[in-house]
Image: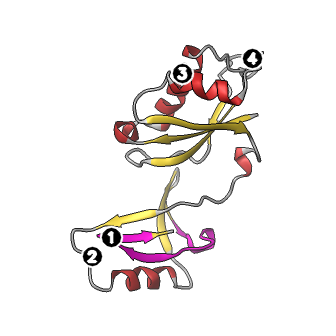
Amino acid sequence: MPRLLFEKTGDAIWMSHLDLMRLFQRGFKRAGLPLKHTQGYNPRPSVSIALPMSVGVSSHCELLDFDLDGCDASNEEILSKLSGCLVGGVKCLAVYDGGRKLRELSFLKCRITLEYTVVPCGAVEAISALFGRNELIVAKKTKNGLQQQDILPMIRHIDIHPADGGIIMD
């Protein structure tokens, strides 16, 4: 199953996950790249975005898995055809044969940049102390209301350091 690496920046950050899915479904159709469809009463195009970002968040490394139906275009052809069929702010970076299935992905490597006009005194130390605790409980909204969850077991590694006009967390 091929995998598409893409970025979502600019005005495209305001697109919801479902709008982004529709955008790619239409983009493949415009590019003349027929997607496989699921079997059953109500077939859907076979596309899946791994770990979709929230509305208002830009990303330079999102993943989309897809399956083509009866089309044996090379990865370079798929990339060039699809690149011209998407809206501004959504840019295809690479197409390659997929690795692990998206549902098997459990960790995400990301960088968070906190930008300030003036970085608060002791901010790096305070953030480091926050993530250095034994537990970090946050409220998580679920179908059944708010639940408390410790997020520290979900963080494998964090590096916090000052940068020009901000703080970077890797």
- Label 4 neighbourhood size at 10 Å, few (<14), some (14-19), many (20+)? few
Q: Which mark is residue 27?
A: 3
**Residue at horizontal 50 percent and vertical 21 percent from the top:** 85
Mark with earlier residue (2, 1): 2
Alpha carbon distance from label 2 to label 3: 42 Å
Work out whether residue 56 or residue 139 is closer to the camera in this orientation and state it: 56
In the image, which residues are magenta? 148-168
- Label 1 neighbourhood size at 10 Å, few (<14), some (14-19), many (20+)? some
Q: Amino acid at mark 1?
A: Gly
Mark with earlier residue (2, 3): 3
Q: Which mark is residue 119?
A: 2
The reply to whether the magenta stretch includes residue 131 is no
Mark with earlier residue (2, 4): 4
Alpha carbon distance from label 2 to label 1: 6 Å
Contact flag, marks 2 and 4 (Cβ < 8 Å): no
Q: Quadrant of the N terminus?
A: top right
Q: Which mark is residue 98?
A: none
- Which secondary structure lies at badge 1? strand
**Residue at horizontal 56 percent and vertical 85 percent from the top:** 134
Left or right? Give the position of 117 relative to 83: left
Mark with earlier residue (1, 3): 3
The reply to whether the magenta stretch includes residue 166 is yes
Residue 98 percent location from the top left of the image = 74, 41
For residue 66, above or below residue 106: above
What is the quadrant of residue 62 in the picture?
top right
Mark with earlier residue (3, 4): 3
Alpha carbon distance from label 1 to label 3: 37 Å
Left or right? Give the position of 47 relative to 21: right
Alpha carbon distance from label 2 to label 4: 53 Å
